[in-house]
Image: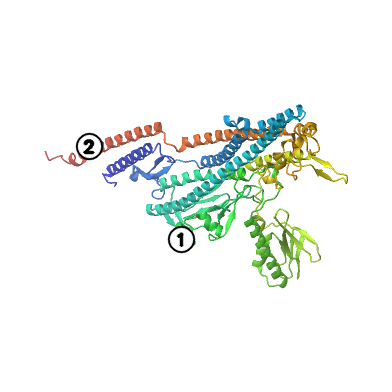
Amino acid sequence: MVSSFMGLYVQREAMILAQKALDVTGNNISNINTPGYTRQRVDICSVANKYGTLGTNTALALAGRGSEAIGVAQIRDRLIDKKVRIYSGDLCNVGVKLETLSDVEDIFDSIEADEINASFASAVSQLKSALQGFSADNADRKELANVAMNSATSLVKCVVNYNAKLNDVSEQALGDTKETVKRINLIFEEMGNLNKQIKDSYVSMGYMTPTLTNYEVMNNYGPLELKDSMNSLLDELSQYGNINFKEEADGTFTIDFAGQRVVEEKYYAQMAITQENPEPTQLEFEITKTLMDRDDWLALHVENQTGGLPELLIRSGAAGETANITGKDGSGTYWLNSGSLRGYLDVYNGRGIYAHETVYSDDAIKDAKAMVDSANELLAKLADGTADESDVLQLRNLIGADVTGTAAPYTVTLGGVELLNGATVSEIKYKDDENGNPVFYIDDGAGGETEITLAGDSGAKLVDISNQDKGIEYYRDMLNAFVKTVTEQFNAVFEYTDENGDIQSYGKIFECGDDFRTMAENFRVTENWEKNPSFISNPTGNNTYEELDNVYINKMLGVIAVSHKYGDGVVEDPLEYSIEKYVAHICDDLGSEISKDKSLYEATDVMLTSQETARSEVMDVSMDEEGINMMNYQKWYNAIARMITTMDEALEKLINGTGLVGLR
């Protein structure tokens, strides 16, 4: 027979549940403005239907056992979370590009009141006007010669000033990149520490059960506030690059960043820019492959006296092997393909059509050459029969070689080129091309060289960091191309062919050096023209002042009027415009790029806002909903209290009002 007081026990538990539900509702309301907070709810089930006790059995004798709380849960949607983080990364990527290119546009527009006369188009126009004025007066006025030379000097100063301002934008982008990397390292560390706290919390709550290999969380409940912190960090990390994560069976989070494992249990990676101050077009990132906990990292910092700076550990090699995340995987997809770091790579390295040369970092070249040296040692072992299966596997991994045979004699080929046939070895060698990049080839011993492409780990390490996005360096190269063309074309005006058919020059009026990448920086009016402004009307020096003419001045005006090709001498399809139209094209191209990025930014922002709204509807605290819950729990509480009163009256009748017959 069921206890007469069972009903009171059931209602007592129900009253405790109602109170706990009100507590959780109050907690939700108090955190309505807390960033990253996920609304919570008490999950309640019927005792008779609770799995593991009575199953679905509701026998009459045991019916009416009441309800029980099985935990406090969060309300989140993983799919929406994923979409929010993807769009967030894309938005930050485009946002960095848009902001940087807007700074570049401010340079070329020169809209400030005190710089109106120093704008690019204005400087070209003033030079043209000065030459026209000089020509109209038959080149017989010395003051007009000074005006023309001064106008040319103004154009030079304008270009040099633009180049210097581009340096400022580039330095700002690099500084922002360094700060972002520092923040990412702190996030990795916080995530590792949070994982430890989450796992310890599950254990202390009794929600963890041991398995054969590890521990496993028994349910979806646990340290909700710690999970909120982890999700907030995941949201922030997604703004810097593409992430993937998995919530493991023991409640911890395993996290990948740019395709590289960065957090696992309490262990985490660190990240660095490969060089302390990389040159423009040379920005790279690397992440440690070895994950360590806070104590291990601290000990390593103390041992190497780094002051806690992970980049010093990474660049010195003290942190162990690293993975470069700058380049592309085998499918041609960037490892780092979203987020603000992707944006910084594109604006700092991007050279557009001028990125036609393969660019490798010094460290990547060093690693690739070292791996080829190791491959040659393995080939020698295979040739003399001292190699084992691990050597064969290592050779495949190093250079992507095809090895046939399970024992000596082996045959090894790479890209159809034979490296080993029995005991005959063709050594892999390397040399630098004109750009300083390594060329790997097979020496057949008879003077023949066959170039090969490395496809293994060394190929992955030989990261091509050339970037065809239109970044800061693309617009600097547009300036360089302008300077190159202007210098060549104007100087050609004063060239002539001597009696031997050789081209000679009366003198140059512009100079810019021989390195295309620094021509805008080194753009100058020659000392020859500065000291003799009338040179352009008397380049031979044979005419008297009264006999100066405008033939060469008109030729200079012709240079401004006709179309020229603008490139670095290597670009296959250089732009072709007149000087004035080329200047306009730079601004138009920049405006078009900004307009494209702005449209993409706005479209991405709409998608992100839509997903954030959907997520807010799921996870954010709603005052209206919590108010309804509060009233419902209050009514529930009152009903339970009334039920207890009713049961108390019934029990009072049972105890004190029965069995009295015959006593009166």
Q: Is residue 157 left or right of residue 187?
A: right
Q: Residue at x 69, y 56 (%)?
A: 455
**What's the residue type where badge 1 is placed?**
Val
Q: Is residue 426 above or below residue 361?
A: below
**What's the residue type where badge 2 is placed?**
Glu
Q: Quadrant of residue 131?
A: top right
Q: Quadrant of residue 659?
A: top left
Question: Dot 2: within a 10 Å radius of its alpha carbon, few (fewer than 14), some, or many (20 or more) residues?
Answer: few
Q: Quadrant of residue 362?
A: bottom right
Judging by the rendered image, the residue that carries numbered circle 2 is 649
Q: Is residue 269 visible?
A: no
Q: Which mark is residue 624?
A: none
Residue 318, position as x, y percentages in the image: 53, 61
Q: Is residue 328 above or below residue 397?
A: above
Residue 271, position as x, y percentages in the image: 54, 53
Q: Residue at x 80, y 62 (%)?
A: 448
In front here: 136 or 180? 136
Of the residues under marks 1 and 2, which one precedes in the sequence? 1
Which is in the foreground here, disc 1 or disc 2? Answer: 1
Judging by the rendered image, the residue that carries numbered circle 1 is 302
In front here: 47 or 159? 159
Question: Dot 1: within a 10 Å radius of its alpha carbon, few (fewer than 14), some, or many (20 or more) residues?
Answer: few
**Quadrant (top left/top right/bottom left/bottom right) for the C terminus:** top left
Q: Residue at x 38, y 32 (%)?
A: 628
